[in-house]
Image: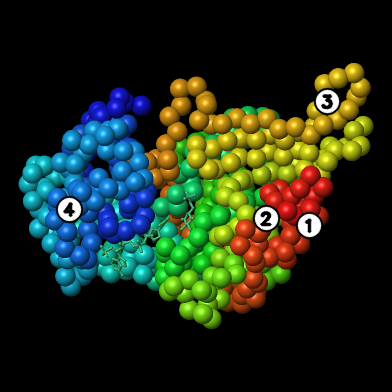
Amino acid sequence: MPDNGTTDTDLPPTIFVLYGATGDLARRMVLPAFYQLAQYGLLPKEWRLVGNGRGDVSHEDFQGRVHDALTEFGPKPEDGPWDDFVGNLRFAGGGFDETDPGSLLDVLEETKQEMGGDPQHVHYLAVPPSAFEKLTKGLQEHGLTDGSRVVYEKPYGTSPDSFRELDELVLSVLDEEQVFRIDHFLGKEGTQDLHVLRFANGLFEHVWDREHVQQVQIDVPETLDVAQRAEFYDATGATLDMLVTHLFQVAAEVAMEPPVDLSPESLQEARESVLAAFRPLAKEDVVLGQFEGYTDIEGVPEDSTTDTFVAARLWVDTDRWHGVPFLLRTGKKLAASEQKVSLVLRKPDGPVTHVPEHGNVITLSLSGAGALDLDFVAKKPGPVLELTQTRTTLDLADIDGGTPLPPYVSLIHDVVTGDRSLFTTSAGLAKAWATVEPLLDDRPEVQPYAEGSWGPSAANELAAPCGWLLGQTEEGDEQ
Ligand SMILES: NC(=O)C1=CN([C@@H]2O[C@H](COP(=O)(O)OP(=O)(O)OC[C@H]3O[C@@H](n4cnc5c(N)ncnc54)[C@H](OP(=O)(O)O)[C@@H]3O)[C@@H](O)[C@H]2O)C=CC1
Ligand SMILES: O=C1O[C@H](COP(=O)(O)O)[C@@H](O)[C@H](O)[C@H]1O
């Protein structure tokens, strides 16, 4: 990692255009990620960031807003190269679409003159999915597509049909190599370690199949509310916001066949191929929920049936995983915030008869810098032969010499360097949408659940006989 405040001189001069620069994602994640890239010296030597929005904001106002965003969401301006950083920030207001480019073209021309040469352009669409189409058409109409890279936030489409329409439009305007569809769960350190831990260690690789694994759990409960983004959330819901996006991608990371090597192309190909083996979700394999009080939130219609919880039993029809349930669960206002990927191992046949149900589990936690937990059964030290269930934890942040990067830092750096391994492809997303399509066509009834609970009790039946690892007492009862 270069020293604080230096720059990566090998990267080409780049203009980043951040559409939606005044929004929630930009303030909380994307702008702080740019500052961290500057801190780590991972930005090109010559770069500018042009924020775009529908309002008129001066360059100076935008610079002030970025300062505020960093103060609130860190790293703090004073902890990094703020004086150099701020000089690279511009704003182009008046919106942007095919009929009216606002002031963007003028600001881009001025910026290009300032920088000299022919900088590469990265267009980052940090806007709601409903705005993807008009911005894409705008890029084409105003001649901004040649040689540029375009980053689309998730969800890429809001239904199988709108995915197909968007995909057709995008691929009529851009080559697939220019398109970077972000799923930030793929950029988490923990997720990236899934394939390294597995393929570099016999301890894991040799048990990574149906013969040894009883079930896989990908469990992402959140205590988070949605009141701050009610309009967006009510139009999206847990199935689109989290299941067809983050949880499916993580499931594909777990389920994939060994790639030829760990090159970006091979990893992407392996992950996306296995999505084709996801069996379309059957109604009886899904539980939808809505927390009590959701429809009282301002901006949510009182008859809304949006799901704030989804649990699904997914089947992966490959030789490796045939018959092993992948249990996926996520929801808002639940009892805890966790991001766990667990492989529950089958009990070994042999002389030890009372191995507990969850005695042998490999778990990767995706939160923060990530952590690996191994649950196993050992002899309780002492004079008698007494078995005990125990856990050892490795925090990935503690690995010597490591510098864990937040997902947006890692993924924006990959866009600049052109590394596509952690981005989704058009073909892969088509398979993800095909898996969820029957559920969207014929939804199970949305069941109420209490705030601070683990969701509707019907979700427990999906995980039987073993049960969910999270939210269980020692005796195996739900808390
Ligand atoms: N917020 C989060 O935690 C996460 C969000 N995402 C994704 O990021 C994207 C943006 O989310 P978020 O920032 O929360 O959303 P916001 O609702 O905050 O929208 C972002 C900005 O987009 C602009 N915008 C809104 N509607 C339109 C429109 N119809 N046409 C053009 N511009 C518009 C607005 O800027 P202005 O008024 O200045 O034009 C707004 O500030 C979404 O696709 C979301 O799924 C992904 C991961 C996490
Ligand atoms: O994309 C999203 O992710 C967040 C959870 O991600 P994290 O990295 O912040 O833990 C989720 O809360 C949000 O609803 C969703 O849009």
Secondary structure under badge 1? Answer: loop
- Report crowding for label 1: few under 14, some 14 to 19, many 20 or more residues within 10 A (C-alpha): few
Q: How is the image coloured?
A: rainbow
- Report crowding for label 3: few under 14, some 14 to 19, many 20 or more residues within 10 A (C-alpha): few
Counting residues from the start of the chain, the first of labels 2 and 1 encountered is 2
- Reading the image, the residue beneath label 3 is 380
Quarter of the image with the N terminus is top left
Quarter of image, res 86: top left
Circle 1 or circle 4, nearest the eye: 4
Determine whether 95 is above or below 189 in the image: below
Write the residue at 36% across / 65% down.
Answer: 128
Q: Nearer the viewer, residue 267 or 187?
A: 187
Q: Marks 2/3: CA distance?
A: 32 Å
Q: Is residue 179 visible?
A: no
Mark 1 CB in 8 Å range of ligand 2? no
- Outermost residue toward the bottom? 303
Give how far across and how far down residue 190 sits, in percent: 53, 39
- Reading the image, the residue beneath label 2 is 327
- Reading the image, the residue beneath label 4 is 61
Write the residue at 31% across / 43% down.
Answer: 71
Proximity of marks 1 and 3: CB atoms separated by less than 8 Å: no
Q: Is residue 442 visible?
A: yes
Counting residues from the start of the chain, the first of labels 2 and 3 encountered is 2
Q: Amino acid at mark 4?
A: Asp
- Report crowding for label 2: few under 14, some 14 to 19, many 20 or more residues within 10 A (C-alpha): many
